[in-house]
Image (cartoon, rainbow, N blue to C red):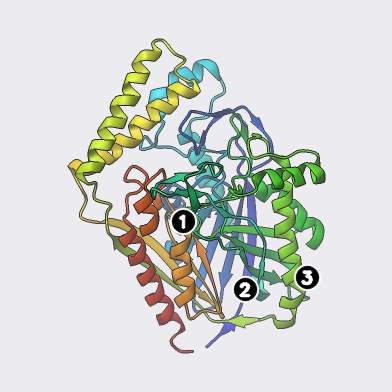
Amino acid sequence: MSSSVRIGWASRDITPRRAVMLRGQFNVRVATRVRDPLTLTALAVDCDGDAAILVSVDACGVEDRVLEASRCALAERIPGIDPRKLIAFSTHTHTGPYQGGDDCWHPEAEYLEALRARYPDYMTPTEYGELLTAALTDAACEAWERRRASKIGWGCSWAVLGENRRVRYFDDRAVMYGKTDTPDFSHIEGHVDHGVNLLFTYDPDGAPTGVVVNVACPSQASEGGQNYISADFWHDARQELRRRLGPGLFVLPQCSAAGDQSPHRQIQARAEERMLRLKYGAGGRDLADNSALRLDLARRIADAVSDAEPAVRKDLHESAVLRHMPLTLELEHWNVTDDEFRTLQRQIAEASAHLEAMGDADVLGANYTSLKAHIVWCRQAVDRYNNPPAHVPAAANVLRLGDIAFVSAPFEYYLDFGDRIKGRSPALQTFIIQLAGTASYLPTERAAAGCSYGAVPASCLVSPAGGQTLVEGAVASLTELFKED
C-alpha cells in the first residue's frame, strides 16, 4: 500500500580552501587552485512506512570512515532514525581530495613533512575528511528537516556519455586506454550504456525542485588535472540544468555501474576532437582542462533531462511505496595465484630498482611518487597472497520507490554486472549506484581474462564470482520488494 511522499533537499559546498592532495592517480598531485566548486547534494524521501537519505558527493569515492562517522552523527542529531538509511556515493571525479587514513597509495604520514614545507597552508586528508563528514551530516539533517509533501515522477532518456575504455588485442590482452591504430587491435572489450535514468521531484504546485540523474559514466573528462579542484562535467551539467529548469533546482548525480567506462572515446577520437574544436574552440582528450568535452557532456545530459521532463509531468505521483533493504554480503575474495604473485614480485623489484636509480629525486615529483605508489599497490596484493581472507564483507542497499528501484554497490562495478541486475529486475527502471563506500574495482570474467589495470589482483579485492554474488543478492531483494505486485 502506498502513502504520501515527502521530499527534502539540501546541498553543501565542500570545496577545500587550502592546498590538498588529489585522489585518483598514481602520482602525488596537490591542488593549489579551484577550477570549479565541489558540491554535496542530499535528498531525503519519506513515505510514512520507510525512509531514505541519498547523498551524492563530488569526490573520487566516499570513504567508509566518513560514511560511518556521518551515520553516527546523524543518529545523535535525529533520534529514532536508522542510520543505515543514509546512503552516500560519489561522482568519481579525479580532481577531488583524499579523505584520510594510511591505507591508500600515498600514506598521509610519509609525505606530510615535504608537503608542509612546500605548501605551508596544506590541508591533510584527515582534515578534509572531517570537513566532509560535517558537511555530509549537516546536509542529510537539513534535507530530513525540510521534508514536505511533494510530487515525484520517473522517466528515462539517452545521452552518449560513457565509453568502454578497455582495448583488446588478438592475443587476448587488454589495456586500459590502449592503442587502436596497431595491426594487433581486435576490439573494444565491452559495450556501453547510454541510458539516463531520471527521478524528478516537484512541489505541490508542480514546480520542479530537483532531479536525480543516473548515468553509466564517471565524472572524468578532466581526469588528468594535476593542480586544481574540480567537479568535472557535473559542474557544467548543474549550471546548464539550472539555466533550463530554474536556478534553485537541486541536481543529484549518480554514477551507475561503470568501472570499465569513461567519457573518452577509443574509436574515432580525432573526429570527436575536431568537432569539439569547431563547437567550442578547443578540444582533445590530452588537455588537462578539457573544457570543450565537459561542456558537450553537460549539454548531452541537459538534453536528455529536457527530453524526458515534459513527458514525466503527465504521470506524477503524490504517493508511492517506499521500502529500503540494506544488504550485508560475503563476497568471494580474489585469491592471488602463484603466477600473479610472481608478477607482483617482479613489478615491485622493477619499481624499487627505478627508485634507487633516481637517487636524490624530488620526493613529491610525479615519477618518484608514481613508483612509490605502484610498490604500495602491489604489496597490498602480496599481503593478500600471504594471508588471503575467507571472504570480503560488503554493504549494499536496495531501495524501492514506486515502480522504480535503486541498488548501491561499494565498488567500481563493471557495467555488465549492472546490466545483469537491470535485466532481471522486476522494477520498471533500476538505478544502479556504484562507489557507495570505500571502493576497489570489481571486474567481469572477460575483463579478468584480459588482465590489465582494473582487472588484476592489485586492483581488485573481490573476484568476478563475487560480482555475481552481489547480482544475485540484489535480484533476490528486488524480487522480495516487488512481490506484492
Q: In this rendering, does residue 249 appear at all?
A: no
Cα–Cα gap, marks 3 and 1: 30 Å
Name the residue that disc number 2 marks.
Answer: 6
Mark 3 or 1: in front is: 1
Q: Is residue 479 above or below residue 20?
A: below
Instruction: Specify the label residue 436 is tagged with.
Output: 1
Secondary structure, mark 1, is loop
Q: Is residue 59 above or below residue 159?
A: above
Instruction: Specify the label residue 289 is tagged with.
Output: none
Residue 154: x and y in percent read 64, 74
Residue 298: x and y in percent read 71, 53
Name the residue that disc number 3 marks.
Answer: 207
Residue 57: x and y in percent read 56, 50
Q: Nearer the viewer, residue 161 or 27?
A: 161
Q: Nearer the viewer, residue 215 or 101?
A: 215
Secondary structure, mark 2, is strand
Secondary structure, mark 3, is loop
Upstream in sequence: badge 3 or badge 2: 2
Task: Kindly identify the amino acid type of the residue bearing the numbered disc 2.
Answer: Arg
Upstream in sequence: badge 3 or badge 1: 3
